[in-house]
């Protein structure tokens, strides 16, 4: 009997130590709470609205998770998303077909990710400073390119990406799911993922073992730029315009989703599916607070407190392990 009790305790403890387990329980509890306080929460239109909102942040958070797993940070994802979207929109307004315009947007994200990665991995500059500078550069270029005004009047065919659906499932949600499946296999089934975790766990030991640390650190920032550009495709399509001011604060939402999902800010510990749960939790929280009429200013305070609590819990678990 005592042996069975010890096993059950061990299993429950192991389950709660799994990255994202606590966040998943909080997500379920939040959904139940919102369904009680607001009769509009569990409606089809509201669930679709949450899914659309979550997809953008969840996609950005894929790249952010990989960066944080190495012990880094990327503050430039919001402005890079805005710049990619304005370049896409500008190209289409100049008569370029949607597909080549989307490629231009993706190349923009890749380029900024490459610059971030090179300065951090090879020039050995602090990730916080580099990505903070790139955040200002990307936002500034977007404002200069557009003159500070939205670029509207995009082709109707482009709207399918952000507003369409396939077999009843919204296109942004399908894109998000596809990207998370790919990210899961990359991080858990390929050598790249093992190296990413190893770098975050002990960069010097990883380097001494013969792994090209600089190369893999550069790659995670390239991926972060790419996922920011992918998110910009959905947002630009949904708005049917390139907004130079879009993506403001999205870097904080991506960091929040990653940390809430159980990824340790010091690197080496976390899970991509936990990040998805974190993004879902944030989406439900934002939506629910809007439904019950909480002030946007108060929402920012609540979100900040949640991030602090998530970092605290993550650090405590890291010490226990």
Image (cartoon, rainbow, N blue to C red):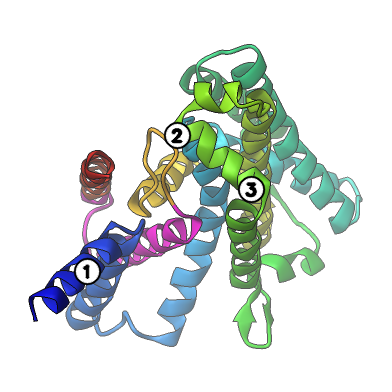
In the depicted structure, whether residue 112 falls above or below residue 187:
above
Query: Which label's residue is closer to the chain start, 2 or 1?
Result: 1
In the depicted structure, whether residue 220 falls above or below residue 234:
above
**Magenta span: helix, strand or loop, mainly?**
helix
Element type at mark 3:
helix
For residue 205, side relative to residue 231 (left or right): left
| Residue 227, disc | 3
Which mark lies nearer to you, 3 or 1? 1
For residue 241, side relative to residue 27 (left or right): right
Residue 299 in magenta stretch:
yes
| Residue 12, disc | 1
Front-lying residue, 190 or 216: 190
Q: CA distance from mark 3 to mark 1?
A: 35 Å
Q: In the rendered image, which quarter is residue 6 located in?
A: bottom left
Q: Position of residue 111 (x, y in %)?
A: 75, 31
Crowd tier of the residue under label 3, counting other residues whose Cα lies within 10 Å: few below 14, some 14–19, many 20 or above: many
Front-lying residue, 178 or 297: 178
Element type at mark 1:
helix
| Residue 201, disc | 2
Q: Position of residue 184 (x, y in %)?
A: 58, 59
The span picked out in magenta is: 271-300
In the depicted structure, whether residue 136 falls above or below residue 158:
above
């Amino acid at each position: 009997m005592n042996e069975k009790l010890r096993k059950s305790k061990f299993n429950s403890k192991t389950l709660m130590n799994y990255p994202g387990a606590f966040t998943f329980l909080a997500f379920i509890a939040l959904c139940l709470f919102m369904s009680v306080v607001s009769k509009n929460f569990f409606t089809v239109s509201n669930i679709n609205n949450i899914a659309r909102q979550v997809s953008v942040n969840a996609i950005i958070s894929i790249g952010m998770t990989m960066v944080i797993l190495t012990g880094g940070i990327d503050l430039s994802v919001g402005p890079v998303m805005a710049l990619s979207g304005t370049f896409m929109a500008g190209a289409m307004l100049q008569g370029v077909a949607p597909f080549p315009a989307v490629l231009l947007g993706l190349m923009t994200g890749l380029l900024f990710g490459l610059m971030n990665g090179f300065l951090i991995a090879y020039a050995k500059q602090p990730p916080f400073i580099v990505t903070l500078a790139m955040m200002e550069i990307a936002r500034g270029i977007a404002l200069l390119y557009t003159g500070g005004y939205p670029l509207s009047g995009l082709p109707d065919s482009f709207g399918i990406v952000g507003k369409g659906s396939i077999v009843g499932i919204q296109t942004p949600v399908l894109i998000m799911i596809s990207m998370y499946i790919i990210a899961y296999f990359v991080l858990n089934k390929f050598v790249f993922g093992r190296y990413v975790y190893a770098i975050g766990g002990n960069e010097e030991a990883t380097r001494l073992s013969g792994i090209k640390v600089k190369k893999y650190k550069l790659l995670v920032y390239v991926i972060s730029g790419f996922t920011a550009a992918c998110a910009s495709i959905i947002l630009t399509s949904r708005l049917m315009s390139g907004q130079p001011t879009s993506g403001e604060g999205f870097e904080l939402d991506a960091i929040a989703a990653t940390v809430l999902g159980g990824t340790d800010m010091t690197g080496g510990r976390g899970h991509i599916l936990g990040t998805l749960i974190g993004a879902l939790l944030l989406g439900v929280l934002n939506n629910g607070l809007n439904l019950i009429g909480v002030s946007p200013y108060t929402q920012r305070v609540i979100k900040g407190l949640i991030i602090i609590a998530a970092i605290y819990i993550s650090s405590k678990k890291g010490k226990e392990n």
